[in-house]
Image (tube, grey):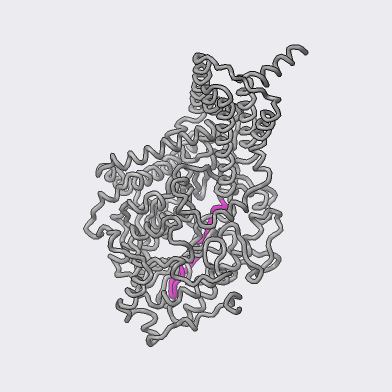
Amino acid sequence: MARTKSFLQWLTHDKLGFFTIVLTLFWLKTYFIYLTKFNLGAVGPMQQFLLLLNPIPAGMLLLGIGLFFKGRKSYWIIVIIDFLLTLWLFSNILYYREFSNFLSFSIIKTSGSTSDNLGKSIVGITLASDFLAFLDIGIIIALLATKVIRIDVRPLRLKLLSLIELLAVCLMGLDLMMAQKDRSGLLTRTFDNNYIVKYLGINEYALYDGYKTAQTSAQMANANVSDLKSVQKYLKATYVKPNKSYTGVAKGKNVLIIHLESFQQFLIGYKWKGKAVTPNLNKIFHAKDTISFDNFFNQVGQGKTSDAEMMLENSLYGLQSGSAMSSYGTSNTFESAPAILHQSGGYTTAVMHGGEGSFWNRNNAYKSFGYQYFMPLSYYQNKPGYYIGYGLKDKLFFKQSIKYIERLPQPFYLKMITVTNHYPYQLDKANQSIDKTDTGDETVDGYVQTAHYLDQAIGELMAWMKKTGLDKNTLLVFYGDHYGISGNHHKASAELLGKDEFNDFDNLNFQRVPLMFHMKGLKGKIDHTYGGEIDVLPTLLNLLGISDKNTIQFGHDLLSKNAPQIVAQRNGDFITPEYAKVSGDYYYTKTGEEISHPDKKLKSELASISNRVTTQLSLSDRVINGNLLRFYRPKWFKKVQIKDYDYNKKVSLEKLKDSNVKTSLWYRNHKKSTESKFKTDAPELKK
């Protein structure tokens, strides 16, 4: 009994005892959060042990800094460090819940370009239990304030303090050694940040990410033309010839890309309470003049929508960490779809978006891509009730876009970015025309309502195109940019799909999004080829009769008879018609059965696919991080000059009026607007 009292006295009356209390609570708290707030997938005794161990070294190292200070200051510095570590942990809880990933320096650095309406999103995903992360700090402060913990002002010997820090570093090194033994190449060939946190810890991940961020800066400075040649060599060796029977079938046609925000493939044909969620898109998907892909996957990383745009416009992957458009959209040289189509086909190029122009650095990146016109929120009337979530409601956005579309000289390449179907899937009552689902997951249940609203807006746009005749000379491209329901909602996802359970393999399959090419006279079909967003540009270029053979593109024509059908995910996972890789485990795609004991031949085949995926991702990263396209000077392509573009509203509208308008819809309609032909049931316009 005396010994227990003595030990308690040491804990509450000695500085090292206080340090031990704080470190122990931090360790247990972090481990508990690992288990309950993240989906790290620790399997086997070694991974479980490392997950338990890894909060200790960084906690000991960082909290130990406070021990070097004298008197009362030492105690409060330890508490402040604990608070900062907890704040980092708390921020990652919220970020992970929505994005199934961890915060990176690239994301934090570019947060100004993605801040629009984030406050509302954060409120929507925060749970009361998340604040328990700060509970131990509150208890410690209370114990200090009530003098249950008494401050020991005696200084500690420098030798002892150095020993504590050395022990922390040794534990960190031991953790890394065991992690490398369990997973070879952890820090050199890992694209999934879950692995870094699982093996090394969330604070070590921050250190690793900071190092990688600095490394990419150095990579750009040291890159040279030989780096580009190695990329070209790989692309030449893996080049897939496009399907000749489709080459040029849309030559000279307008291209209208409809960016379907957060729209997943399962919504096509999906019914809720007997009502089709997306009747208009269902009709387009199954139309005889639509080429629809039902095994088409999003491949985004942390950059989400911006990653989808990077792949769509450039056939380059997004980055492992952060957003390429935000980080490199202003400085890098690109060989993008709008520049290619303008130079090779005389296209007028434009983007229309009812959100802020600075979001994802679009107002700068689009200039680097070669877009002649960018019409963000400042081009649109925004009255109370018009704006929801991340931009104008889709019906109002399409309605107001008509006056700009009809003035574009044809042929045009136009991308229209919808936003109403964006998380947190909120819609005012007047616009709700289908019930929410009843999974009990608030994040998920509004999804069908906003998807249904988006579909109605698409129907109104299609009706206008038919009335004006624009549908007869336009190739429509519909694509979903990324998932709407993240991998942190397995229970709700299972209910929506009518499944008994929903695992990580199911979630990989859930990454399917729509891709449709729709045009009058097009020989349509539902194509079961496996592909992803990286493949859209080569497929589109072939349909338009523009060769992609001498381009720096990592995708291929999805209609090619020799399509490799290997769909890489940004974290290094993949899916093919036969096999899938999820978090280091392999599965048979058709059955979902795990491949637990592959024979030598199968093991070699899986390793070959995995190696191809990591090689592609690495080389694409090298192109962006090293800005390698600055060394690319083909005769057929002229480098885009940012200074040639100005998105000022007055300047752009004057330019449209002064352009060769004889090919525009406005001119062909006897110099009269077609706005009256656009019919919408938007309740905001009936007030």
Residue 497 sits above or below residue 614 on the image: below
Q: Position of residue 305 (x, y in %)?
A: 48, 56
Residue 537: tell me if it is visible: no
* Quadrant for the C terminus in the image: bottom right
Residue 403: image x %, image y %? Answer: 43, 77
> On the picture, is 647 further left or further right than 452?
left
Magenta stretch, residue numbers: 509-525
Residue reaching furthest to the right:
1
Q: Is residue 639 left or right of residue 349?
A: left
* Image quadrant where one finds the N terminus: top right
Residue 434: image quadrant is bottom right
- What residue is at 48 percent from the left and 42 percent from the top? 104
Of residue 252 and residue 102, the one placed in the foreground of this image is 102
Q: Is residue 522 magenta?
A: yes
In this view, 252 is above or below 645: below
Residue placed most toward the observer, 24 or 472:
24
Residue at 55 percent of width and 29 percent of height: 77
- Location of residue 461 in the rendering, given as x and y in whole percent from the top left corner: 50, 74
Q: Is-magenta flag for residue 513?
A: yes
Closer to the camera in the image, 375 or 538: 375
Assign the magenta stretch its main secondary structure. loop
Q: Quadrant of residue 448?
A: bottom right
For residue 432, say whether it is visible. Answer: yes
Number of callouts in the render? 0
- Residue 286 on image: x %, y %: 54, 69
